[in-house]
Amino acid sequence: MSWRERSPAIDLAAQLAAEPNRRLRGKSIPPVRPAAPVPPERPLGWLAALKALRQNPITAFPEGAYEARTLEIGRSGRRLLLVNDPAAIQHILVDNATNYRKSVQQRRLLQPALGDGLLTAEGEAWRSARRIAAPLFSPRAIGALFDDMSSAANAMTDRWRTRGDTSTPLDLVAEFQRLTYEIVSRTVFSGALDEDRIRVHAHMAIYFETLGRLDLAGLLNLPPWLPTPARLRARPALQAFRSVVDRVVGEREQESDREIVDLLDRLMAAPDPTNGRSLPPEAVSDNVLTFLAAGHETTGNALAWTLYLLALFPEAAERAREEVRSVFKGGSVTRSDLDRLVFTRAVINETLRLYPPAPFMGREALGPDRAGEREIPAGAQIVISPWIVHRHRGLWPQPDSFCPERFLLPGAELFPRGSFIPFGLGPRICIGQGFAVQEILTVLATILPGFRFTLADAPSVFPQARITLQPRQALAMRVEPY
Ligand code: HEM
């Protein structure tokens, strides 16, 4: 049986594509194409490909990459493999996850900043940190963070209402990143980093902007300690945010009879339930940085892209706004009713499909393997790209169009595991998934009924992949109270 025949998503795709006018639920798919590169028909030459990979990796992949099940990238002896087949993705990330570790590229990009934090650690260091952090990310614990999320969102709307000139556009990327940083610092670290918020946030942004590009030294296999120009430029920023975090950890150490309340307390005091050991001090700082970094930019970008898409598609914006109004009836947003925002949730899923905030994941095969129909040699570097898988021509009908209804269709839940992967899959799946979804829903429910959002310069919006996917320049939008 062929790949195309096997996948329920493809059955659904075929079913939808066969309908007259390619209608989803009786509604024509809007002709507007949300901003995205048009893939070149043929593979780029190696110099052009290298340039594209460095400037904006999502522009480097030819049309064939969006049609293939797997694709070999370049001609390096080290075998770089793009994997799109959902069954192979499920195999690599879930079924045989122990045969893989984070790829060389990901380690080189993230480890200098995040050390052995949860995102970059392997083996026992990863297992310990995950077990220690997990209770704070249970559905119940996340529910308890709702009030903090909601009051941070309300403080933002108060600021929007009281600013003098509401016709001047705001940069929604900056607005939402500030908000999500505040939320993660307040909820996960009880505000311990609030005082230095602007400094830490600014230095982190400089660091990831400087080092978040494809690492040419890595591609050329140069040793990781080599002081490349980018590393030298990023070093002061790295030292600045590390020193703040080390100081905050030191201060917390002095509070001897503190109860265990937040993630920092748990990281410092709670022993791993399986071996009774606490994390070493460097691992505590690494994890503070990891949760700050992984926990705000992704969610901030997801919010910015949602507002961009709703501004492009006013009908969907009106439907989401009406849904929020009818669920909360003009009163305050409550945790228990967030689940009733069914259409708004579909809008979020469609946004995460079109603009996955983490556009690339990387793995290295420790031993030889077979994933789907593909042999994988030991040492192969695997790229799994939510950006490409989510726009795959064989998996999604109208892959580049915005159509939240696809997540409401009967059978939508049949999309095979491995075809919709904004949060990854398997043991390394995003620990903050529930946190992020609750945060995005809370913010949308707070802002949609009271404000009109219009794009100030729609043609300038274009996705730019670094470690996360964000609008290339600011996302300038007019935000006007109704
Ligand atoms: C829309 C928002 C978010 C997206 C799209 C996202 C995406 C991802 C993805 C794709 C991974 C897996 C990477 C891999 O397998 O290589 C991941 C891991 C992780 N995420 Fe998120 N994330 C989001 C929000 C958050 C939040 C809010 C937090 C924390 C408060 C967080 C903390 C982490 C951590 C610590 C890991 C590493 C987990 C591990 O390896 O065990 N993320 N995230």
Image (tube, helix red, strand yellow):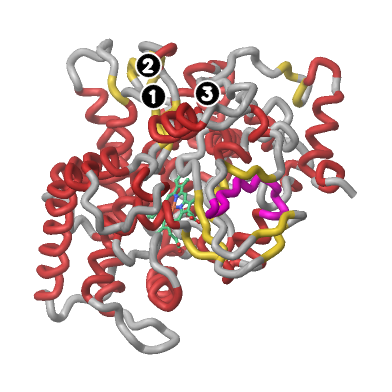
* The one of 214 and 273 positioned closer to us in this rendering: 214
Residue of label 2: 482
* Residue farthest along the bottom direction in this orientation: 276
- Total marks shown come to 3
Can you identify the residue that label 3 sits on? Answer: 36
Q: Is residue 58 magenta?
A: no
Of residue 316 and residue 132, the one placed in the foreground of this image is: 132
Q: Nearer the viewer, residue 435 or 356?
A: 356
Q: Nearer the viewer, residue 162 or 36?
A: 36
**Dot 1: what SS?**
loop
Asked if disc 1 and disc 2 are in contact, CB closer than 8 Å, the reply is yes
Is residue 96 shown above or below 112? below
Q: Name the amino acid, label 3.
A: Ala
On the image, the x and y values in percent for residue 481 come to 33, 18
Q: Residue at x 51, y 17 (%)?
A: 312
Q: Earlier in the sequence, mark 3 or mark 1?
A: 3
Left or right: 423 in relation to 439: right
Q: Is residue 394 left or right of residue 347?
A: right
Q: Position of residue 412 (x, y in %)?
A: 73, 41
Crowding around mark 2 (Cα neighbors within 10 Å: few <14, some 14 to 19, many 20+) is: few
Dividing the picture into quadrants, the one containing residue 151 is top left
Q: Which residues are magenta?
A: 77-88
Relative side of 170 to 251, left or right: right
Give me the residue at 71% from left, 62% from top: 370
Percent x, y of residue 294: 36, 51
Q: Which numbered dot is residue 450? A: 1
